Image (cartoon, coloured by chain):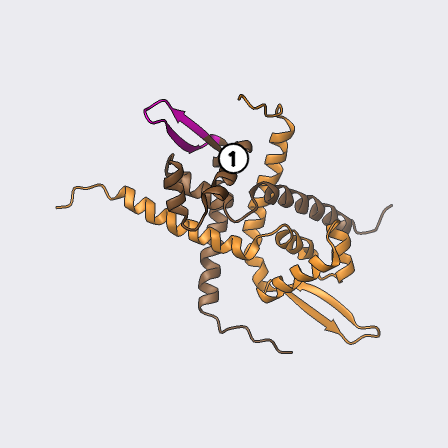
Chain colours: A orange, B brown
Amino acid sequence: MNTQPELIPHQGEACLASVKAVKDALYVLSGKWKLPLILTLSNGPLRFKEIQRALGEITPKILSKELKELELNEFVERKVFSTVPVTVLYELTPYSKSLDKVLDELRNWGLQHRQRIMHQPPIVSED
Amino acid sequence: MNTQPELIPHQGEACLASVKAVKDALYVLSGKWKLPLILTLSNGPLRFKEIQRALGEITPKILSKELKELELNEFVERKVFSTVPVTVLYELTPYSKSLDKVLDELRNWGLQHRQRIMHQPPIVSED
């Protein structure tokens, strides 16, 4: 009969699996712009210039790179319409919807954290 | 009487506020290590070397920097015990618990995303 508590190794393994899953998520979503970009497109497709305006301080070069990475990971689709001149729209894919809960929790946490740091005295080092 | 639909500007404002809140969250939590570090400490306080071992490929220099940033943002407390030699433990603060839901959702999403990319044919460019 095994009387040893199995809790600690199980916790350890579960923790390692969690770390791996969170790292997987961060690997795809990391960076300053990926999630704000997905949020910006969540109201509907936009042109490049419109996205740039909505995000504020992003450069065209960075925006272009970020959009390409989001396309590769199938969160965003680039649609070209044969108007004159050509219209290019960036649209969220159905898969991007899988991020809704992550985004909700990040938004809730961000709002709560801002409240906290605004109502808090500045941190003074005790050294 | 104002008969214009108010939906679009409202959505726009809500979207901007969301983008800001998510950017706030990412500003504090960004980087490859912050959230994995918090997860690693979620089973209890650990020594520096133990954290390093748990995280795998992190260098002592980076780990030290990341822990300091987590301390400044009050997610982690560094506790020094006057043993011989001195024992230093890193422990999560109660405030770090506010990240539980964010971490849960990131973990769920990471697991689901890994399943997806493992069961998917490789992406082939159509250009």
**Residue indicated by mark 1:** B68
Q: Decide which of B9, A37 is in the foreground and name it.
A: A37
Q: Is residue A73 magenta?
A: no
Occupied quadrant, residue A126: top right
- Across and down, in percent, residue A55 comes to 73, 51
Residue at image coords 38%, 49%: A16
Residue at image coords 70%, 46%: B14
Occupied quadrant, residue A113: top right
Per the rendered image, the range of residues in magenta is B78-94
State the residue lying farthest toward the bottom: B127
Occupied quadrant, residue B26: top right
At label 1, the amino acid type is Lys
Q: Decide which of B89, A1 is in the foreground and name it.
A: B89
Q: Decide which of B89, A26 is in the foreground and name it.
A: B89
- Across and down, in percent, residue B91 comes to 42, 33
Q: How many marks?
A: 1
Badge 1 sits on which subunit? B
- Across and down, in percent, residue A59 comes to 74, 55
> Is residue B77 shown to the viewer in this render?
yes
Of helix, strand and loop, which one carries label 1?
helix
Label 1: few (<14), some (14–19) or many (≥20) C-alpha neighbours in 10 Å: some
> Which quarter of the rendered picture does the N terminus of chain B lie within?
top right
Q: On the picture, is A65 further left or further right than B118?
A: right
Residue at image coords 49%, 37%: B67
Q: Say if A91 sits above or below A22 in the image.
A: below
